[in-house]
């Protein structure tokens, strides 16, 4: 409360809290009165409910706003198993493939290469959200069908992005893991639709969202009934411009501390340049990531999208060898 | 090109450019070779197309990636007229009302108050994207119907948010102006759907998007056929935490310099606190904004959402008086 | 405290607090125990003192870390009078002149022009901190002497930057107001030296510092004995690149709310481009700034530093006329 | 040039360039004229020199503003040897010790522990820049003397911070490596003083400075004559608040690509919490850092500064074992 708050003003806060099922405790400081609000559901009550009351100076949240994804709700690590591939366990899982599905030849060549190098999951985009309306927007359903045939041919689970809430069941028919892109992390219409389906989902971090907001978005999915959520750090927007985004490597130990969900890293979108990708991939594994999502293109120079950040099959294979050594050095496998 | 690039490598860049319909010009510097790529459509070609070629050091874009929204495409200011209210002209337009439609009483009381104080457009949310799955999500279609009856009762055009691409035509039936929220600025499925409709639209700036990205998102709408676009600055995410977002006041003169579209300002979401709103509103008008989008609630203490940033009818009325003086001092009206 | 904290662990926090002269109050929540720490000097105790103790989950500061600059310490506005010019009162004070003192002709021409247009204080840099070692670093003491002669000739107080703690008394001999640049806001050796002198000081905000850190830096000066402090907002670093820095216009009402010190705005460094400066200057006055610090150069095309952001005398004179109208519209003068 | 620029305006740019010793080449595009400016010293010419000329739209820098620190200037890695410890070679160097020197017992206990665990350099602060004027500011010269005696006793080189340009030679008498703190990275008075001395220096990255600005600040030191510069990444300021700063792990491969200088990482200041430090330290080694700067305190709970981020000797020893495994996995040693 502000200095000089009256007893009536203090009482109105207490009454508001009581009406919401909270208990209160008063701290009559030398300078100011502080009112503690206590209850198991404070995370679901907006701080503004109290901030608007007369003579309230600030309302500070002590408890986190998320619940189901927290370590306190579930202390042991969640492991999500997709077609026999366990994500979140001792093995570091590598998902790799082209940014966008372009042709059958391109996709199959990429799939063959990443499988040979040790990747467990094939990635590839059919619906591509693009910042310019004049850019290639993906093959759509045709791309999904190509992904499904590659899944069959190479016996690998497939992850692909969904951008429209009304496409969720369509995409879930073709893919093993749905992906929510960074620009859609707070697209709540999309999150609600995915929360109702049974397909595992990779939830990419919004490039301008805090870890707390990211976990709260994941709470949307779990609250909807879908608890097969894999978090994916892919870089945040900062003032630094030597990379496309700044990979927030600290988010990995922070997530591990506060949540039971597995977390993987996409070094390709963070770096924006293939020459920077290997260092970030190695750092991610050393920091404790449960997996990686890496762009590999059979011929980056001809890629329709994001060729600059794609590794060639040769570079990817070399990187996998290095990652295996690092995984081993921390007691994990790839 | 990198130091030591070979003639063949230079030639491969030139050939790639030629194949895309671009002209090239070589600058053989003392240290490095620089290749200029020239053509009217460079904005639509990704820089990566060249960045992936051997010995290319960096590709720097000189032209902007947007086109239809630019001053070069159309030099005179666009004025968008909604039910007789011209947005982008000499008059500063104030849109005001509650964050969320809660009840008929609340909405009508707000509408009556903002109209009396001089607002031209009524705002109110029926679909509310919320960061927590446990928060109030808006009244949905019932809210739209309340808005339509307030529109009729008070003879004011209405602006309201649309969050799902499949709701565009529904919302356009009830509202005079659609609103794309900050978290949806790069929701391209939504932008495509709105581009195809004929309803004016307020495009809020993504809180982590540059002015260039914002204008490029607006290009989506114009490219789709909808050129009744009103830009809305509402604060960006920075390290500063004394306000909810940092209002990027500079974006107003920057937009005016590079685009013909009208730009308005939402001081309420930027500030996050009613005590800060008036100063931001006054600054916006002085900086040249074409309008304001302000939250007003008949009883902020009882608001279901964002009560802390809402003005009371009394405070709003006082602010309008002050804004009238400022508008007059720069040769505009309210 | 973490869930499961023991009574001994709670007791060790209480004992630590008691040893530091704090009172404590326990909140035994359903999930967690929260310990309130109470006392008039909590702002001076690092949160880490408690955060390191066993089973402490987080330590959240309710009180601000600054003291002497706060409204609670002194409720009425501070007015700093420099040679008869009151800063922080009803009149908006304009400080203008070239970024760097280059020659007598340049400085006198600028001084004559800004005085004629209505500026009250002459600005000009003698010591220039430059990001590149190969750039012009200012005239040093020769520049100070030129400033002193312009001060005499035009009967205007002079503000100039000091960069080295050992130059403080030298610069104070020539100038009426010292300036601490943005990159030096947390140069505590410099702040300590200035705190001991009696010269008024403009403390520019560090471009990556929060308002709270800025006020805490000002506390250094007041704690040292110098309470003639004028705060100066000059833009913060964000991801936005259409302006050099992002002017944090919200900081003006925030400072007015929490501190009694006057606050002025430098639109020139924020904008980085003369075409953007007038809109920012007008916004600053409308938002409640007590003054402006504007770069004016008789011939920006020939300026040795920052010519792009300098106004010509003609543009400055036109801007002053506009600012007078805005000041009048909010009940102030210029 | 802007659309519609006249031949005279183009000519005035060419003449300005010629007067500065640059060559020019014109690109007469379909929409716009682009003028390329060529010469070996463009990095030292401000873009504004041209941006202020009539009808110039933008000036885009293709070459980097730094020179002596670049890979192009010197292609092989620089190795800086301090008392037999080579920094920048195959071995990863660990510098460890307390944030601040408090007492002889504390310093010697820390030194003994970090040496036993395998650290090569002892760190400890005597001059502490603090954000609050009421906090412990370090022991000053007494702290330097304690460091010198620990250096002698444990036969380890010592790194310590210098904050005032006039203290450089004093600190260089006691220490083997000077440290420039993050808040002083652009304190050019300090950089100039250190550039003139012969002592190796750790240049911490400004927490709001780009990699380019950091390398340009390093250029100050090399231009002054001191080329024994070790860069230190310590986290940048972003909107994320779950860690104190966001460690920019990408800066390591970026620095390696553009500069020949060694780069080390301070995970302690970035994390702000001891529980996060080990993951960041491991990531840094995996990403290719040449060393680490880690805070270790014999009794973090009693530390006068930053105890929350300090490791205990036991935790540090465990971390060193893990780091040795990671270094081995990438073909390096510790």
Image (tube, coloured by chain):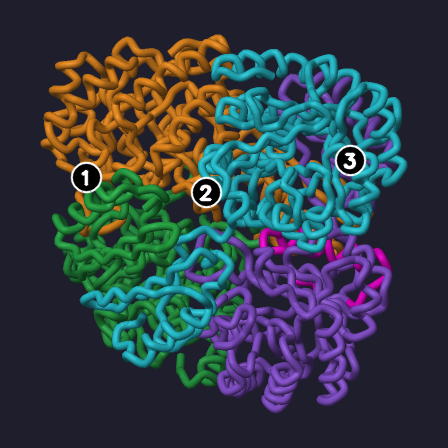
Chain colours: A green, B orange, C cyan, D purple
Q: Mark 1 = which residue?
A: B304
- Left or right position of D139 against B84: right
Q: Is D217 a magenta residue?
A: yes
The chain letter for the residue carrying disc 3 is C
The image quarter containing residue A74 is bottom left
Are discs 1 and 2 both within one chain? no
Q: Mark 3 = which residue?
A: C125
> Which one is nearer the viewer's eye here, A177 or D193?
D193
Q: Which residues are magenta?
A: D203-228
Q: Residue at x 85, y 65 (%)?
A: D197
Q: Position of residue B70 (x, y in %)?
A: 49, 24
Question: Dot 2: what SS?
Answer: loop
Whether the residues at callouts 1 and 2 have beta carbons within 8 Å, the answer is no
Q: Residue at x 41, y 9 (%)?
A: B333
Q: CA distance from mark 3 to mark 2?
A: 35 Å
Are discs 1 and 3 both within one chain? no
Q: Mark 2 = which residue?
A: C72
* Disc 2: CA contacts within 10 A as few (<14), some (14-19) or many (>=20): some
Looking at the image, is mark 3 or mark 2 earlier in the sequence? 2
Question: Dot 3: what SS?
Answer: loop
The chain letter for the residue carrying disc 2 is C
Q: Nearer the viewer, mark 3 or mark 2?
A: 2
């Amino acid at each position: 409360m502000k200095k000089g708050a009256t007893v009536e003003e203090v009482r109105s806060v207490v009454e508001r809290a009581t009406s919401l099922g909270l208990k209160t405790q008063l701290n009559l400081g030398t300078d100011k009165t502080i009112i503690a609000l206590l209850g198991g559901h404070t995370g679901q009550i907006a701080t503004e409910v109290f901030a608007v009351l007369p003579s309230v100076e600030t309302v500070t949240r002590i408890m986190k706003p998320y619940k189901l994804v927290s370590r306190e709700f579930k202390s042991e690590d969640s492991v999500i198993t997709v077609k026999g591939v366990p994500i979140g366990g001792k093995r570091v899982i590598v998902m790799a493939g082209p940014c966008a599905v372009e042709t059958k030849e391109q996709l199959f060549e990429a799939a063959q290469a990443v499988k040979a190098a040790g990747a467990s999951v094939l990635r590839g985009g059919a619906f591509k959200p693009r910042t310019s309306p004049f850019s290639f927007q993906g093959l759509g359903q045709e791309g999904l069908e190509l992904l499904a045939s590659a899944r069959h041919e190479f016996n690998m689970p497939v992850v692909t992005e969904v951008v429209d809430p009304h496409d969720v069941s369509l995409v879930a028919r073709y893919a093993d893991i749905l992906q929510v892109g960074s620009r859609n992390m707070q697209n709540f219409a999309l999150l609600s639709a995915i929360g109702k389906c049974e397909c595992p989902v990779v939830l990419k971090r919004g490039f301008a969202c805090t870890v707390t907001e990211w976990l709260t978005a994941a709470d949307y999915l779990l609250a909807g009934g879908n608890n097969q959520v894999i978090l994916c750090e892919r870089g945040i927007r900062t003032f630094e411009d030597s990379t496309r985004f700044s990979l927030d490597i600290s988010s990995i130990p922070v997530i591990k501390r506060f949540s039971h969900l597995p977390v993987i890293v996409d070094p390709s979108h963070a770096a924006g340049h293939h020459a920077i990708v290997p260092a970030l991939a190695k750092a991610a594994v050393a920091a404790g990531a449960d997996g990686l999502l890496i762009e590999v293109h059979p011929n980056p120079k001809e890629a329709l999208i994001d060729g600059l950040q794609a590794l060639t099959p040769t570079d990817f294979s070399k990187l996998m060898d290095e990652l295996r050594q690092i995984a081993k050095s921390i007691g994990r496998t790839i």
